[in-house]
Amino acid sequence: MQLTPQLLPDLVQVIADAIENNAEEVTALDQAIGDGDHVFNLQRGIQALKAQSAELSQMDWVAAWQKVGMTLMTTIGGASGSLYGTLFMAMSKAAHERPLTLSSFAEVYGQGVEAVKQRGKADVGEKTMLDVLVPVADSLWQSSAEAVELPVALSKLTDVAVAGMESTRDMVATKGRASFLEERSRGHIDAGAKTAQLMICAIVALLVERLTAPT
Ligand code: ADP
Ligand code: MG
């Protein structure tokens, strides 16, 4: 199987399902230390991507990620809209038109996460989606450097994403709405970290299934 944008319709679908199946839990998290709209915001973006799925699947990565980024930027709203928009637009800039490999994806995704850090003026340890996105980038770099097989490299990301999400529970938020609560933000998982973990785990599960399916 080649990693081309033909995967995008199925990827968008598994992401939509992951968010839908966990909507109540995530909304409760966001109500505890945010304003409760995070799932709704993401679902607006996902719906817009679903409507573009067929078109996206015919593009190359440079064009597809640019379109995904623009769409998310203009539909999600909230802090997460500009951050996810930035992620994919930066990935488009770093991408090549050919199918992805582990090392090219590690590079492209790493550039995307760097752009998110800059856009949000944030880094690991501030109780945001970056506590999931950054360790995932680090794990991809490491697997790429060690020339690990792609399905193995992907499978590692599940534990990394869950650990990153869990790590936000004991943090005090210093970025985003939750930062207004200061010490009272401690003890709750960040909603944006939770949805980042859910989306990454859904992507990994689909790709591993496809990569290891008997042909
Ligand atoms: P808003 O906070 O504007 O209502 P959302 O509810 O859609 O937007 O998204 C909130 C999530 O965005 C937070 O849970 C957090 O993970 C993430 N976030 C907020 N600010 C930042 C930032 N500066 N950098 C990275 N992520 C952030
Ligand atoms: Mg919100």
Image (cartoon, grey):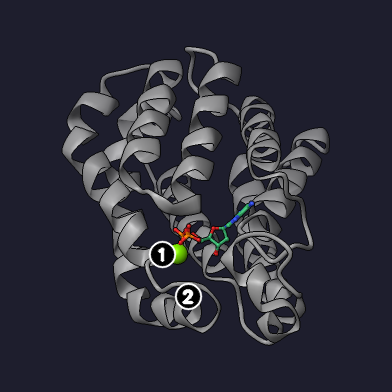
Q: Say which label, 2 or 1, has the lower sequence index.
A: 2
Q: Quadrant of ligand 2?
A: bottom left
Q: Residues within 10 Å of mark 1 (few under 14, many from 20)?
A: many
Q: Residue at x 27, y 40 (%)?
A: 49
Report whether the residue tagged 1 is closer than 8 Å to ligand 1.
yes
Q: Residue at x 77, y 56 (%)?
A: 124
Residue 188 in view, yes or no = yes
Q: What kind of residue is marked 1? A: His
* Residue 89 left/right relative to 17: right
In the image, residue 132 sits, relative to residue 28, either above or below, namely above
Q: Secondary structure at mark 2?
A: helix
* Residue 200 left/right relative to 16: right
Q: Residue at x 43, y 83 (%)?
A: 28
In the image, residue 14 sits, relative to residue 109, either above or below, namely below
Q: What kind of residue is marked 2? A: Asp
* Residue 133 left/right relative to 87: right
Q: Position of residue 151 (x, y in %)?
A: 58, 47
Verify CB contact (< 8 Å) between mark 2 and mark 1: yes
Residue reaching furthest to the top: 97
Q: Quadrant of residue 157?
A: bottom right
Mark on residue 84? none
Q: Residues within 10 Å of mark 2 (few under 14, many from 20)?
A: many
Q: Residue at x 76, y 75 (%)?
A: 171
Residue underneath mark 1: 38
How far separated are the C-alphas under marks 2 and 1? 7 Å
Q: Secondary structure at mark 1?
A: helix
Residue reaching furthest to the front: 180
Residue underneath mark 2: 30
Q: Position of residue 115 (x, y in %)?
A: 65, 33
